[in-house]
Image: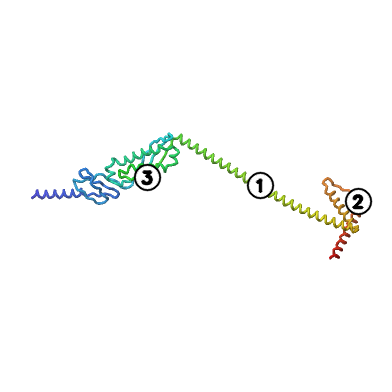
């Protein structure tokens, strides 16, 4: 009876142990592969899972979340024989757990070496200037090549980024001198362009000033000519009136004409710049008589115009 009790207890303990060994809890973001006698049979999803004890066992435990892997620095020789140091980073995600577990040995190591090899291949086919100015193109080419190569492994490479490109020190110094010379060249060009624009604007201003001055002189000459024309017309009218008066036998007209010329001559003598003292050997009564003649002529002209009206 005691032996039977021991056997039952042993069976119960064995059943409990087998029950516990058959339960597998898979965390979120993970997947486990199940192998029966060393052969893959199925994949355990996140959550509560049961396997057959003794016959089944958990094979690979795979992280199904997107992962980041650093690419260590390595030296690359460019197309123009420049030695540079490059590092990067790879983002990838396992999409097919059985392929990632059984199609390749050491998945991370395989992705890392594949990426480093393609970095040397892609960047080695480009010039130094292209490497520094076309980093997006390099990333896209690397992503395309590495993603295609890892597809049979059940992996999706989402991004490949070049973090840093370090040229040699002498090349960096040469690039700095070249950049400085280029900036000085642009500054000189801008300065020369500014002087050119200033000279053009100055010439345009002088041109407009000359045009306006010429137009002003033209207008002044026109008005001066017009004034001289009116003055000549007035003198002609006065001469005609005097001639008519002389023809009519008026002595006052003769006196007017003589007095007018006499006063004009005195004005010219007085306006001479080299004359300070003027001696006139004439009688003032003669000038007054001429002025009286001018008055009589004016009265006669006004009386005639009144009768004609």
The residue lying toward the viewer, choosing from 57 and 210, is 210
> Which residue shows up at 78% across the image and 53% down it?
229
Q: Residue 202, percent across and down?
A: 63, 45
Q: Which residue is mark 2?
A: 282
Q: Nearer the viewer, mark 1 or mark 3?
A: 1
Q: First in sequence: mark 3 or mark 2? A: 3
Determine crowd level at label 2: few under 14, some 14-19, many 20+ residues with C-alpha closer than 10 A: few
Cα distance, mark 1 to mark 3?
65 Å
Q: Which residue is mark 3?
A: 159
Cα distance, mark 3 to mark 2?
121 Å
> Which residue shows up at 86% across the image and 63% down it?
304
Q: In the image, 143: left or right of 272?
A: left
Cα distance, mark 2 to mark 1?
58 Å
> Which residue shows up at 50% across the image and 37% down it?
178
> Which residue shows up at 37% across the image and 45% down it?
159
Helix, strand or loop under label 1: helix
Q: How many marks?
A: 3
Q: Nearer the viewer, mark 3 or mark 2?
A: 3
Q: Nearer the viewer, mark 2 or mark 1?
A: 1
Question: Which quadrant would residue 107 be assigned to in this image?
Answer: top left
Q: Which mark is residue 207?
A: 1
Q: Residue 265, percent across and down?
A: 86, 50
Q: Residue 132, percent across and down?
A: 44, 40
């Amino acid at each position: 009876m005691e032996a039977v009790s021991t056997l039952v207890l042993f069976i119960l303990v064995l059943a409990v142990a087998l029950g516990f060994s058959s339960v597998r809890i898979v965390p979120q973001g993970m997947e486990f592969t199940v192998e029966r006698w060393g052969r893959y049979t199925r994949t355990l999803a996140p959550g509560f899972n049961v396997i057959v004890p003794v016959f089944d066992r958990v094979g690979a435990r795979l992280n199904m979340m997107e992962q980041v892997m650093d690419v260590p620095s390595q030296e690359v020789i460019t197309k123009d024989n420049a030695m540079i140091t490059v590092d990067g980073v790879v983002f990838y995600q396992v999409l097919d757990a059985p392929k990632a577990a059984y199609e390749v040995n050491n998945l991370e190591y395989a992705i890392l070496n594949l990426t480093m090899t393609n970095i040397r291949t892609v960047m080695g086919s480009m010039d130094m200037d292209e490497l520094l100015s076309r980093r997006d193109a390099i990333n896209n080419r690397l992503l395309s090549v590495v993603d295609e190569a890892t597809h049979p492994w059940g992996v999706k490479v989402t991004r490949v980024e070049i973090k840093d490109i370090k040229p040699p020190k002498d090349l960096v110094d040469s690039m700095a001198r070249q950049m400085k010379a280029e900036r000085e060249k642009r500054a000189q060009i801008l300065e020369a362009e500014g002087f050119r624009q200033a000279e053009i604007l100055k010439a345009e201003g002088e041109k407009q000033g000359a045009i306006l001055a010429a137009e002003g002189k033209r207008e002044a000459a026109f008005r001066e000519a017009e004034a001289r024309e009116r003055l000549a017309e007035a003198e002609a009218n006065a001469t005609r009136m005097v001639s008519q008066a002389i023809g009519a036998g008026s002595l006052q007209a003769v006196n007017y004409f003589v007095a007018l010329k006499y006063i004009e001559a005195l004005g010219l003598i007085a306006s001479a710049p080299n004359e300070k003292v003027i001696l006139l050997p004439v009688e003032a009564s003669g000038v007054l008589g001429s002025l009286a003649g001018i008055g009589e002529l004016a009265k006669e002209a006004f009386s005639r115009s009144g009768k004609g009206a």
